[in-house]
Image: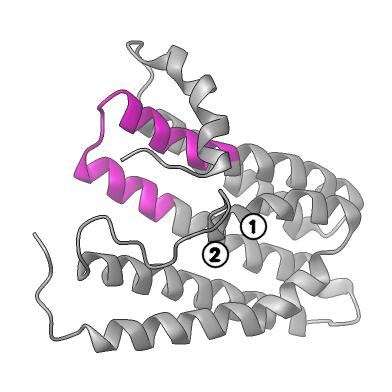
Amino acid sequence: MLGDSWTHLMARPFVRPLIGTWVRPNHLTTLRLLSGLAACACFALGTQAGMGWGGALWLVSAFLDRADGELARLGDMTSPAGHIYDYLADNAVNALFFVSIGIGLRTSWLGNWAIAIGLLDGAALFLCNVFSEWLEQRSPANTRAYSGKWGFDPDDALYLMGPLAWLGWLMPVLVGAAFGTTFMMTLTGVRLLRLRRLPVKE
């Protein structure tokens, strides 16, 4: 099923010309992974230049996160292996984002606590995504753990991280995520426990 968020709609005109070519969704997923890791490496520097380049690369990576899935659906190239690869790449990049900005902010007034908070944020987000996947597997078909509104998905908030990096506002993001991601991880875990006795859908 095609995505219906604004970011999915934005990706479609760019991926349609790729249908029928040698480009496959996994190629875009690999680019998403590499650009995301490069962005994280820049954020970890903690410099103004690092934040600038990191923010730009992060936006590219976030866009490719939408583009690979849209290419797979529009070109009828979906596969279980492709889904797993996309899932692992997304989880790794999104979790490392918080770890990297924690490292980058180690020279701020937070000191080494920034690294600890980044690790907490990254672990909580990773577990939240894992719990969400398990929750969807145990729910009726096409059920999402968290649905968006007004054309926005919850993970569309990741697009904001690029501009926030340019503005130098990643510290509030790091500290706020310590509460937000932990809360969402706990909430999703509780929802999952309520379904633990139901069989996984085929």
Residue bearing the label numbered 1? 157
What amino acid type is highlighted by mark number 1?
Ala
Task: Kindly report which numbered mark, 1 or 2, lies closer to the viewer in this rendering.
Answer: 1
In terms of depth relative to the viewer, which is nearer, 111 or 139? 139
Residue 101 lies, in percent from the top left, at 73, 64
For the point 55% across and 85% down, which residue is it? 183
**Picture quarter with the N terminus:** top left
Residue drawn at x 47%, y 22% as measured from the top left: 15
- Residue 47 pos. (x, y %): 88, 55
Q: Splitting the image into 4 quarters, where does residue 127 fall? A: bottom left
| Position of residue 109 measured from the top left corner of the image (x, y, whole percent) | 91, 81
In terms of sequence position, does the residue under pointer 1 or pointer 2 come before the other?
2
**What distance separates the C-alpha of mark 1 from that of mark 2?**
14 Å
| Disc 1 secondary structure class | helix
Crowding near pointer 2: few (<14 within 10 Å), some, many (20+)?
A: many
Circle 2 is placed at which residue position?
A: 95
- Is residue 172 magenta-colored? no
On whether residue 78 falls in the magenta region, the answer is: yes
Please state if 78 lies on the left or on the right of 164 as rendered.
left
Q: Which residues are magenta?
A: 63-89
Label 2, secondary structure: give it: helix
